[in-house]
Image (cartoon, rainbow, N blue to C red):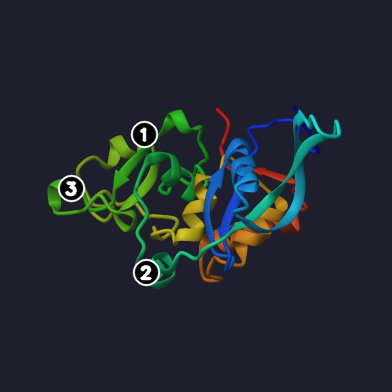
Amino acid sequence: MLAGIVSDISQQVLRTDVAGMPLEWIDYREAVRLYHADQVAYQTGTLLYTVFGGYSSYDGTRSKVGVNSIIATHGTSQGLSRDRDKYVPPLNNRTLFKRDANLCLYCAMRYPTRDLTRDHITPISRGGGDTWNNVATACRRCNNYKGGRTPEQAAMQLIAVPFTPTYAEYIYLKGRRVLTDQMQYLLAHIPRSSPLHARLSDHLADGAEIVDVHFHE
């Protein structure tokens, strides 16, 4: 049984290591498992929900676990800490489109996910790679018009410079819904020079309680 401020139990919990480095999104089942296994070092953020268990045969009390929006677990991710500056997240369309805020980087129009494509700025046929820095979100019309040409050859100009997300940025992009306190936490781990830092700062300045990172179709 669940009770709490979040009616949708699909709301994800942000898990960090004990040093505070963001690690991943987990669901309430995994969060409760970590609490019961005494793996939670501390918690922060807001109370999302309280999970009630069975009754004690000894005194009749009912077990319960309060799950916060951000929990830190024991242990450190030394490998990640050492290599995070070199980390390159896997490339997929879902996170690519979110990186570019569902904007076509050629015509600057926002589209639902179903109408977007992955464009290789330097086409693969011309030696370009399938990498974050060589891909851009494009609407079908712009991608078809550009074809197998470079932007220069097609007389098209990118409205933003593609970039490779950091680990913290990638966690943000993977989130289905990001609460304000989770966003504030992740923002502290995102470089100020990043376009995502400016976007998240704008969301927070608008006082958004929940930011839906998926552009609804």
CA neighbours of label 1 inside 10 A, class few (<14), some (14 to 19), many (20+): few
Q: Callout 2: helix, strand or loop?
A: helix
Tell me: residue 159, above or below residue 10: below
- Identify the residue under disc 1: 141
- Name the residue nearer the viewer: 132 or 80: 80
Q: Nearer the viewer, mark 3 or mark 2?
A: 2
CA neighbours of label 3 inside 10 A, class few (<14), some (14 to 19), many (20+): few
**Mark 2 residue type:** Asp
- Identify the residue under disc 3: 124
- Identify the residue under disc 2: 83
Q: Earlier in the sequence, mark 3 or mark 1?
A: 3
**Quick check: marks 1 and 2 in contact, CB under 8 Å?**
no
Tell me: residue 193, above or below residue 101: below
**Mark 1 residue type:** Arg
Is residue 77 among what the camera can see? Answer: yes
Spot the residue most to the front: 58
Q: Residue at x 37, y 69 (%)?
A: 83
Image quarter for residue 63?
top right
Quarter of the image with the N terminus is: top right
Is residue 104 among what the camera can see? Answer: no
Q: CA distance from mark 3 to mark 2?
A: 28 Å
Q: CA distance from mark 3 to mark 1?
A: 19 Å
Tell me: residue 27, above or below residue 99: above
CA neighbours of label 2 inside 10 A, class few (<14), some (14 to 19), many (20+): few
Counting from the top left corner in percent of width and height, residue 95 is at 44, 45
Counting from the top left corner in percent of width and height, residue 80 is at 41, 65
Q: Earlier in the sequence, mark 3 or mark 2?
A: 2
Q: Callout 1: helix, strand or loop?
A: helix
